[in-house]
Image: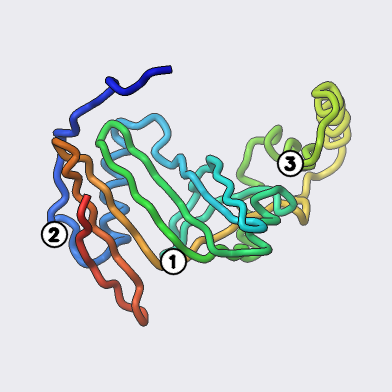
Amino acid sequence: MDLKDQRIDYTKFELMEDHAGSDPFALFKRWFNEASTIEIEPNVMIISTSHNSQPETRVVLLKELVDEQFVFYTNYNSRKGQAIQDNPHVSLLFFWQQHQRQVRINGIATKVPEQQSDDYFKSRPIESQIGAIASTQSSILEDRSQLELRMEELKNYYKFHPIERPAHWGGYQVKPMHFEFWQGRTSRLHDRICFDNESGSWNRKRLYP
């Protein structure tokens, strides 16, 4: 594969200090709302964790931004859950291709309150609820038919029993300590504006591209 000649010049927008403001959450919400008008899934969020010095990255979905924390849901026993238990420092990435923008966030992940996980679990489609129970996420599956059979067994069982959120499934909330807002610019002279939390206040600075 030779991709050296695949290039796009970023010319749509700019990120100046008067637009960035002093509140990274306000800027994030503004960019997110703009992305929502054109991106298929603007809440796609890449999360990176580290376990035994090995970084791992995957896609999850942002489900809430509440009390200045980014919330997503998963199986606590999954590889990401185990990594967060060992090292709660995580990195998030949003990329909005149509606006030629990305946001990087470093922060600390903790579990959301159980009631919050209960409420979200109940809001999910029934099959998604059952799927969370059927899957022992990240463990070895010898044959997909085993999972499909387990799903059918649980569907039949829950026709006559209430579904409850399993204890191993719930939400994480990420409290940001660092933001970087990246706006693609022409000639690769991109705009990069960072916010760092210093003693409860956000310090803004511009970085070379």
Asked if the residue at tag 1 contacts the one at tag 3, i.e. Cβ–Cβ closer than 8 Å, the answer is no
Q: Residues within 10 Å of mark 2 (few under 14, many from 20)?
A: few
Q: Position of residue 203 (x, y in %)?
A: 26, 72
Amino acid marked by disc 3: Ser
Q: Position of residue 2 (x, y in %)?
A: 38, 18
Residue that numbered label 2 is attached to: 17
Q: Position of residue 68 (x, y in %)?
A: 41, 65
Which residue: 22% across, 49% down? 209
Residue 138, labelled with which disc? 3
Amino acid marked by disc 1: Asp
- Whether residue 92 is situated above or below residue 141 in the rendered picture: below
- Whether residue 206 is situated above or below residue 101 in the rendered picture: below
Asked if the residue at tag 2 contacts the one at tag 3, i.e. Cβ–Cβ closer than 8 Å, the answer is no
Residue that numbered label 1 is attached to: 67
For residue 57, side relative to residue 133 (left or right): left
Quarter of the image for residue 7 reads top left
Which residue: 39% across, 38% down? 42
Q: In the orientation shown, which residue stands out farthest toward the top?
A: 1
Q: Residues within 10 Å of mark 1 (few under 14, many from 20)?
A: few
Front position in the image: 56 or 165: 56
Amino acid marked by disc 2: Glu
Front position in the image: 72 or 152: 72
Question: Who comes first in sequence, dot 3 or dot 1?
Answer: 1
